[in-house]
Image: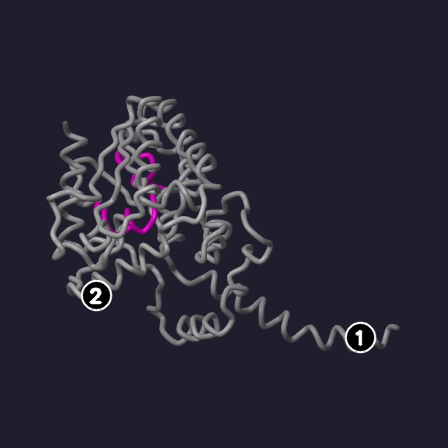
Amino acid sequence: MKQFLRRLLLFISPPIIIATFLEFSLRKIPNDYVYKKNYLDTAADKCAVLVLGSSHAYYDVLPQYFTEKGFNAAHVSQSLSYDLSIYTAYQEKLSQLKYLILPVDYFSLFETLEESAEKWRIKNYNIYYQLPPKGDFVNRFVVTSNFKLNIERCYNFYSDPNYTEQYCSVWGNGNHSDTASEKQLLLDAQNAITRHTIKDTQWLSYNVLALDSIVRIAQAHHTKIIVYSSPACDAYTRLLEPKQYQLLQQTMAKFCAKYPQVANYNFLKPQLFSNNDFFDADHLNTTGAKKLSLVLDSLMRK
């Protein structure tokens, strides 16, 4: 028996050592999550405007154009429950917060990160934000997500002293400088609508409850809230599923009737943006993002 255990230990030790080394190394790579946590840990008390949300906020809202000091804490595929988790974790440190800006889009009330194709991102909140663990046990580790890719990332980290996976600006936002062609917008719109159109409404009450909790925290700290529907190109808006869009509108109308201090704006089909303002069907490029950010700033200054 002892000999068997000794052989077993010899057999499993190399993979464990390699996995441990990779995990340790991968966690050292700079990324958006690390940067944003460090900012909120050290400078949350200087923030007057906090932006939360998914990639629609990450790319579309540029705090550098705000009159008040702002920071973008949105992430790609960040669902409302994670917005709530971040806001809850930093509510006391956000002592100077005047405005919270949050997109509630065509898909926002009907999906959650845990049940999406992007659920591998859960580990970023567990590991880097150190929020209460969510998801499966494998989401506690970086190395479990994509072994081949992680080998490449580890190689890049050790071979290039300047290697980073932090893509956000100092204000926390991402940037897309390119403009999509009409053909690309049409293709992107079809793919995006396929991802964003729901099969059922099982997550509706869950997300409304998360939104409700966000508003209650803001109320307790005398923080104003702006929620909005993000801009999308014509090719995207033409493909919206009418019942889903109507349910979103009806739900938000009831929600804002319950909380009249919540300012709700619909930029999904505005005249302000042209197709030249989009990087893809539902994300603004830097030109369009500047337009939206200045509009949001004007709304805060009203």
Of the pair 214 and 150, the residue shown nearer to us: 214
Q: What kind of element bears circle 1?
A: helix
Give the amino acid type for the residue marked by disc 1 in the picture.
Arg
Of the pair 114 and 202, the residue shown nearer to us: 202
- Residue 172 visible in the picture: no
Q: Which residues are magenta?
A: 42-62
Of the pair 194 and 141, the residue shown nearer to us: 194
Q: Quadrant of residue 101?
A: top left
- Taking the spot 41% from the left edge, 70% from the top edge, the residue there is 157
Please provide percent x and percent y for residue 18. Answer: 58, 72
Please provide percent x and percent y for residue 268. Answer: 22, 44
- If the image is split into quadrants, where does the C terminus sit? top left
- Is 29 above or below relative to 70? below
| Among the two numbered marks 1 and 2 on one chain, the one whose residue lies closer to the N terminus | 1
Closest to the camera, between mark 1 and mark 2, is: 2
For disc 2, the marked residue is: 184
Numbered badge on residue 82: none
For disc 1, the marked residue is: 6
